[in-house]
Amino acid sequence: MGSCTSKSKKKREHFTNTLQARGEILGADLRAMFNNPVYSDIIITCKDGGVVYGSKLLLAARSDVFARILLNPAKAESENEGSELIPADVNIINISFPEFTSSTLLIVLEYLYMGSITQETLSLNNVVEAYLCSEYFMIPQLEEIIITFLDNALRCSADNNLSARLLSQAAECMLPSSDDSFFRTMYNCLATTSLETVDYENLNEAALRFILSPICGGDADEEFVTPEYSVFRYTVLWSAHKISSSLVSYFEPLLPPADMAERLDAQKLNQLRSLHEKRKKKSKSMEIQKSIDPILSPLLSYVNFNLIHPSILINIIEPLDIILPEILAKAFRWQTQLPPGSGPKRSRGIITAKHENLKLHWDQKAHGKKIVLLEHGTIVKSQSRNFGFARTSLPIRGYEVYEWDFIIEEPCKHTWIGVCSIRDNRVNYSTWLGGTSYGWVLGSNGYLAHNKGGVINENSRRNLKNYGLKFTKGTIITMHLNMENRTLAYSINGINFGEAFGDLPNEVYPAVSIKRPGKIKIQSHKKTTSMISMGNFQENSESDPLSSSL
């Protein structure tokens, strides 16, 4: 049987020193009593086989649940509290809690003894069970501590799948509810994250239903950044993934991503129609429909087809033959009643360019080998003499204007700041981003760079040196990304230089390309009352310094 009372020599010495100061500080005395068999008359056995020690009178005084179990065990057993009292020595009470591990139960006992918990007690590995345990023992103050920890952890994490995994874990143990702050915290994170960035295996059915269920109420004032077609696409591919990876491969070409689906030209439409015809001839479409229908059909009630553009309904969704015709007909009828000149909304909620939406953290895996991440992924630092680049974890797409700041914490000889695109590209993160076809960057030498057609675009060689601006420690470079016009503009220390790049892809990531000792922080843009404008970047009539600057 395991035990939670084993201590290192150092901890035993600390315990002895604490006893020497007995009676001086109440908190120190309670800490000495916590999980100490010397001061305990209760032994609690947990589901992992570990044991936890406690004081009958202290726990009963601090918790109604413990009071019912310890002071009136017969009544507690008849009420089926979930604990099991084990006969033992007359002076020792043995209790079993098969629902919780010993490490989780220690969190509850630490709070009951101390009125708080130490920083190292909670972790992402035990936060779900800790919340369930605090609910079981009805300790609302501890619940608030756990929810605050969870909220901070999700905000600091660059892993878009973290909240999905935790939500799925919690949904296996209790019914998700939007009135529960714990579930609401995870929902808020997922609502402001593109659903398409969440891996299918990280969401179980209960979690997915919970994420999509607010559509039934339809609160348009809440944030939900995933377009409704993307909700439908994700739901289909998630259902296909539950069956087999080959079924995902079958549906993926038939369901292009939202940014492509909304901009299908005649050529792409013909290609899509031909693909549908080929698939129907080669594969058994009726068998595919029957295999996916039991999983997909219950989820379709969470998709609002009224928010999907008619062209997508006709050209992409209808040919799949997995949606009942009356569902599509109902959406068409609803859209015909819209005022002339107006179309359906794209999303069930509002989309705003805020810190939570942009996920302004550097991706843990998308950076050069000699680039390290600091301060919860908000800072990148180079440790190499050669160029490397890093990008953020979440792409920016849509039709909004997005703004964010890069702060130079440590300048290097050559710093390049801008955006990149990874779609349909073989990306090399250990290279100079400005020399690639997937990078659009401004350099600390005052030049813009983008490789188009194998050479750096002549039209992008423009100079900022005339304004006497350099990237020094503390310089703030603000990015102004207009996804409606697909343009990128820069401001440096509040001076706006106008449009730098146009004709950007429909999906980009904030990115930087640096050498040692470069160190750059990314954060949401804090607007000032006024912005000095210098118009468009000026063309440089001098010889090109790009090759020498590298």
Image (cartoon, grey):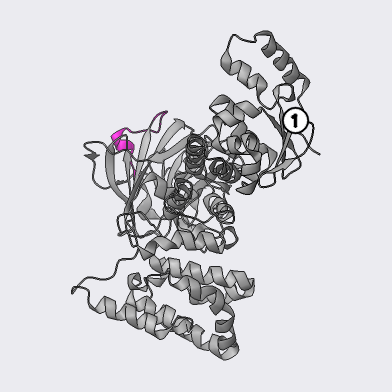
- Residue 477 appears in which quarter of the rendering? top left
- Name the residue: 45% across, 30% down: 409
Counting from the top left corner in percent of width and height, residue 332 is at 31, 80
In the picture, which quadrant includes the N terminus?
top right
Name the residue beneath numbered marker 1.
Answer: 92
Viewer-proximal residue among 324 and 230: 324
Name above or below for residue 253 compared with residue 35. Answer: below
Check if residue 465 falls in the magenta segment: yes
- Magenta: main secondary structure: loop
Tally the marks.
Answer: 1
Farthest left residue in view: 340
Q: Looking at the image, is 233 positioned above or below residue 333?
A: above
Is residue 190 rendered magenta in the image?
no
**From which residue to which does the magenta span run?**
463-474
Residue ID at (48%, 82%): 320
Evaluate whether residue 145 shows in this view.
yes
Residue most toward the right?
1
